[in-house]
Image (spheres, rainbow, N blue to C red):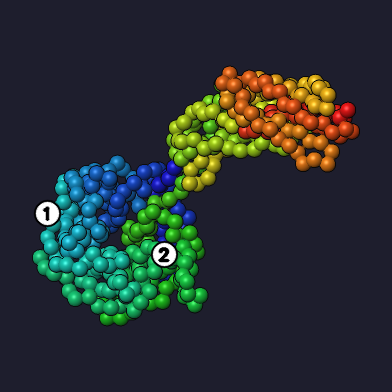
Amino acid sequence: MVTSKLLFYKDYTQDGTGDVNTPKVIGQSGWGDYKFLFSGGNGIIYAVDQAGRLLFYRDETQDATGDIGAPKVIGLGGWQHFKFLFSGGNGIIYAVDQAGRLLFYRDYKQDGTGDVNTPAVIGLSGWQQYKFLFSGGNGIIYAVDQAGKLLFYRDNTQNGTGDVDIPKVIGLGGWDAYKFLFSGGNGIIYAVTLKSTNPRDHRTEGRLLFYRDYKQDGTGDVDTPKVIGQGGWDVYKFLFSGGKGAIYAVDNVIMKPNAPSALKVTEVADRKISVSWIDNSNNENEFLIRFVGKRTGFSDHTGSKSVARNTISTSLTGLRSNNQYTISAVALNSDGESPKSNEVHAETPARTISVSKEVSGANLVFTVTGSGFTPNSLVVIKITAQNWQPVQFQSTAGADGTFVQKQPVICLSSFMLTFTSYEDADPTGTFANAIIMACP
């Protein structure tokens, strides 16, 4: 289960001189379910749910002291179809539609009380091609193109009345390699690194970097980045700034499932043990039933059976006869497995095969009888003599699981014979008394 908590960080200095603080939880769960999640400034957080509605949240304190309020719906549907959706501050919301147009919306009230306005087109095409697209506030729009260059646009009017200006290049390359790239306002740009294949590259996995676009007018390169978060920032589902040093994150932590309990044996039959349990989790992908069978003089029979999520019973088949089995269960998901359940024990029934003999001159006739065979199963009769390779004869058990077979053997004088039998499908689980004798 992904917890999807909303976390609050603060970059107190906002100058690249130190680590951001330890996060505090301000939203308990479900924040990872949104298609878009971004800040509108002044504690406003916009979200787009699975139904395509635009939601309005407010972090009233902006200091991590408490949960944010319940959302209000301010857009009734269709918001999930955009390629990009981000705020420009002061109620401005920019969107890029499927045709690559840049749209301008305005949330006039910024209090969650009503629909945002009908969009105006302020960019005619091509906006869908960017790797990143985000606002720096005050009409600034940053973009990263397919060549990895950082571009600077300005929406001069900020009222939806016209095209934004022609972009200027303020970062020469490599900006497409980041996991996250977003503005903190006042020229601040935060980036989260991915692992680079170039050993000379300054980027290493999961660090939070601090850049500054000092002029904020498109006239020059941004400065060299400073590391303000040492690692692990790449694991988040969402990461964005709320301005004034606030950084919001949605975790992507998958919780291991709870252990199943009350495991019990419900049936014991020929090479079969059935079990049931209580499912205590709601986030398992499967259950794994493990077993170990032991029988004196034989190797252990170890294995497992996987069953689907929400299953509460199963049967272990193909076990060995006359084995003492220890059985346990765990629940699994992509984060790992739960603690194991209680253990249960059960012994599979023995399958007895009887062997007897009679002498007829130089010939021996062995009689094999038994019950509890698998119906119509193959039964092997094995004879070993001094200086012989083992000789095997095969026959079939009856439909009721019983078996009777007479097998004549030519006996050479003074040879020692060993005669035994087993079921072909379960040679270590079935057993017979072995007859050892010298030929007359």
Q: Position of residue 102 (x, y in %)?
A: 18, 63
Q: Residue furthest left?
A: 161
| Picture layout, residue 220 above or below residue 337 | below
**How much space separates mark 1 and mark 2, taking CA atoms?**
34 Å
Q: Residue 192 carries which label?
A: 2
Q: Nearer the viewer, residue 12 or 165?
A: 165
Whether residue 93 is visible: yes
Residue 148: quadrant of the picture: bottom left
Q: Check the picture and name the quadrant holding the C terminus.
A: top right
Q: What element carries label 2?
A: strand
Amino acid, disc 1: Thr
| x 25%, y 59%: residue | 84
- 182 horizontally vs 205: left or right: left
Q: Where is residue 223 in the image (x, y as percent from the top left)?
A: 38, 77
| x 34%, y 46%: residue | 33
Q: Position of residue 307 (x, y in %)?
A: 49, 35
Q: Residue furthest front?
A: 361
| x 26%, y 49%: residue | 48
- 264 horizontally vs 60: left or right: right
Q: Mark 1 points at which residue?
A: 118
Q: Which of 93 and 169 is in front in this view?
A: 169
